[in-house]
Structures are given as C-alpha cells and as structure tokens.
Amino acid sequence: MAAQTVASASTDSAFGPASALSCRECGERFPLEPLFACEACFGPLEVAYDLPSGDPETLRKRIESGPNNIWRYAPLLPVPADVASKPNLNPGFTKLVKADNLARELGVTGGLHIKDDSGNPTHSFKDRVVAIALEAARTFGLTTLSCSSTGNLAGAVGAAAARAGFRSCVFIPHDLEEGKVVMAAVYGGELVGIEGTYDDVNRFCSELIGDPIGEGWGFVNVNLRPYYGEGSKTLAYEICEQLGWRLPDNIVIPIASGSQLTKIDKGLRELIALGLVEEKPYRIYGAQAEGCSPVSTAFKAGHDVVRPQKPNTIAKSLAIGNPADGPYVLDIARRTGGAVEDVNDEQVVDAIKLLARTEGIFAETAGGVTVGVLRKLIETGQLDPAGETVVLNTGDGLKTLDAVAPTSRPTATIRPSLDAFRAAGLAG
Ligand SMILES: *Cc1c(COP(=O)(O)O)cnc(C)c1O
Ligand SMILES: [Zn+2]
C-alpha cells in the first residue's frame, strides 16, 4: 500500500464537503485515505458527501461567481476551499456548442449540443479527473504521480505533475498513436511503454502499488481512483449550467472503464438533490467501438455481468477490454431508459469527418465513437430525436491523425499559376 503518512494529519477541510469513502457494493464506510477497494467485500469505493444544505439560489450564485474552470464547483468536490490558489492545470468550463448543422444531418429536432472537451489544457477530458486526484495526492503527501493509461491520461498526468512539482512516471501500451506518445513524453516525466494491452498495463500497475517500489506513488486511476472519478461530475455540472441550469433529455457518453459515465450520472443526481435543476427524466447512453465493446455486448444480451474482450479498434483511448465500472454502466443505462451501443471503425472515421464537416470540430476517435453511436441510436429508434440531446467529444483529433489521414488529403497539388488551378478543375 502506498504511503499514507500525511493522511491521518489531513483535516476534514482538505476534502471540502467529502465526509468518507463508501463501498458501492455493501455501503461500508472508510476514512478519506488512498484506498480504492472495500476491506469487507472488495467492492469499489467512492466519495460520500455532506453536500451543502440551504437555498439553491445562494449556491447557484456562488458557483456562477467562481472561476471559469472546474473549481467553480469546489463546494461539490473533494477538494479544499482554497483549491484554486494551488498550482494545477485548472481544466474545464469547455464549450457547449449548439450543433444545428449536425442536428439537421441526423434528424435531431429537439436541439443538439456538443460538449467539446478537446478544449482542455492537454486536449482531453482527462485533465478534469487528474486535477482532483492531484489535490488528493498533495494532501496525502505522495510524491510521484502515476497512472495506467490508454493515452490521454498519460499526457494529463505528465502535464499536471510538471505544473505542480511532482515526479511523474506513467505507463501506456507500447503501440499507441504517435500524438499520444509524444504528448505523454514532452512534459519531462518518465513514460514507460508496456508490451501488452491496456489491461496488461493495469495489472502491472496494481502489482507495483502492492510492492515497496510503489511507496509514495499516487496512481490517479488506481489508488486515487475514488477521488479521480469525482472529476467527471464536473461534466454534468457544466452541461446543466450551460443549458441555463436545466437537465437535457439525452446524453451520449463514451465508455472506456465506464468511470466517466457513472460519475456524470452521479453529478446529475446531485444537482437534482441540491435543487439546482428541476427534476425530470433523463436518459444516459453509452458509446463503445465494436472492436472493444464488452459493455454494449452485455447490454444487448440483457446480461448483468460484463465479459472481458481483447480490444482491436482504432478508438484506442476507449480500448479497455475489462472495464471496472461496466456493471454500473449497465445499471444506469437501464435505470434511465437509455442504451449502450457500438459502431465499427469505418463508422468512427465517417463520424469524425461528419462532425468536422458540419460543425468545424475535429474530434479524436472517441468523439467519432459518440457521434457515430448517436447516429445509430437515432436510426434504430433507440433515441428520441425530439428530445434535447448532448453528445460528448472527449478528445482532440490532432492526437489521432492516423484515423483520417488516408482520406484527408489536399484536393490538388499544383504549380502556382492560374492555368494550373483551372486545369485542376477548381475554377468554379
Ligand atoms: C479516458 C477517456 C474516456 C473515458 O474513460 P472512462 O474510463 O470510461 O472514464 C473517454 N474519452 C477519452 C478521449 C478518454 O481518453
Ligand atoms: Zn464493501
């Protein structure tokens, strides 16, 4: 187990409104420490809160007067009240883009929005989760920031560690896209390619945590996972605030481990409980690539358990064959009346180009998965196009150029003359 030296010295206020870790399976409670599995039943732990009580209008005003990043929601996160003054990448408050052109193409009549998280500091949604895990690492006195990554997380950890003055050592499958590898390495920390899949990387990291080598290490998505996960709630908060403090009808969310999807649902339920949005039904849809679709396969078969798969898809950021939160994703999709669907690699590429052509947004493959799945959900009658819909783009297309490079070339390459331009058939 990683060092917990400073943990006992930490005051309650280091975690703001958070009161304990609680087991998602048996409800057993534990102190706020670098723990991730229940000692009673091995179930995953999550952060429990004493959320602010009182007038929702006061809380709404306090949030609206906060900084233009995730720290405006500090009263709802496991972070100290002065978190915004500490060195951090300050991610979030990314654009919610009204996507009328894409809506027309897809036949969405109830309003369509892209939550575009490519605008974060390292160009993926992972900056949100790392920002929270970093604060926990600081409080616990951990000195090395680490992770097992499908690509984006490695870059987000490397950058956050550089900013905050931590050592970093991150682990990735050896065969990732060039853009992901370079972004993970450029911040100067250690980057280790593991010969194997993400699931092999993750298993290796669990071993490292259990070994004395892992003393003082904060693996953001392993021993700091309960804190890390809370960062995804900010997507739910932002979407509702940007809609004018309203819930959408449908949200389409990509699934790797399933953490993001489950925490967006948690965030929405908190907003309802706090009276910050009016309660109404909402549907949560999960999106996977066909080449790594353990959750959508289980959903379609009506199973409660998720059978691991060996990933084979261009959507590498989502290529987790044994997703930790898979069963919880199934629960949420079923409880809210949503679904989990998948699209093949060709449909991912088509969807990346569709989004770029209609809205001027260049998504990474994960965004191709969500937009492609949205299209499929509408075509198959699983999503009501008359509902107000939000689709997530969680990463930047510049990191996965290979997906569209073969079919995105210059229209013509010519000599610099009008004759050549005419000869190329471009003169109108
Ligand atoms: C990590 C990641 C996700 C979602 O990951 P979860 O493990 O399901 O939380 C989605 N999109 C991108 C681009 C990612 O890098
Ligand atoms: Zn338990």
Image (spheres, rainbow, N blue to C red):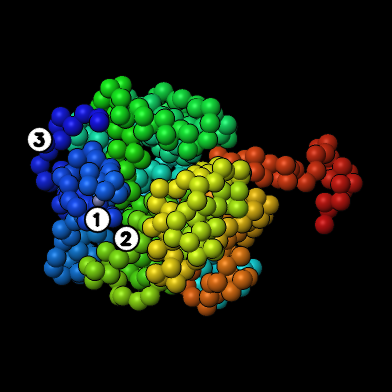
Q: Is mark 1 within 8 Å of ligand 2?
A: yes
At label 2, the amino acid type is Lys
Q: Is residue 238 above or below residue 159?
A: below
Q: Closer to the N terminus: mark 2 or mark 1?
A: 1
Q: Is residue 407 above or below residue 389?
A: above
For the N terminus, the quadrant is top left
What residue do we see at 60% from left, 59% from top?
372
Q: Which mark is residue 266?
A: 2
In this orientation, which residue lies closer to the viewer: 39 or 195? 39
- Which residue corresponds to mark 1? 26
Q: Is residue 40 above or below residue 148?
A: below
Front position among marks 1 and 3 = 1
- Which residue corresponds to mark 3? 9
Q: Are marks 1 and 3 in contact (CB under 8 Å)?
A: no
What residue do we see at 28% from left, 69% from top?
272
Identify the element where label 2 is drawn. Answer: helix
At label 3, the amino acid type is Ala
Image position of 423 (left or right of 149): right
Q: Are marks 2 and 1 in contact (CB under 8 Å)?
A: no
Identify the element where label 3 is drawn. Answer: helix
At label 1, the amino acid type is Cys
Image position of 39 (left or right of 319): left
- Residue 412 position, x and y percent, is 80, 43
Q: Closer to the N terminus: mark 2 or mark 3?
A: 3
- Residue 65 position, x and y percent, is 24, 58
In this orientation, which residue lies closer to the viewer: 371 or 175? 175
Residue 82 seen = no
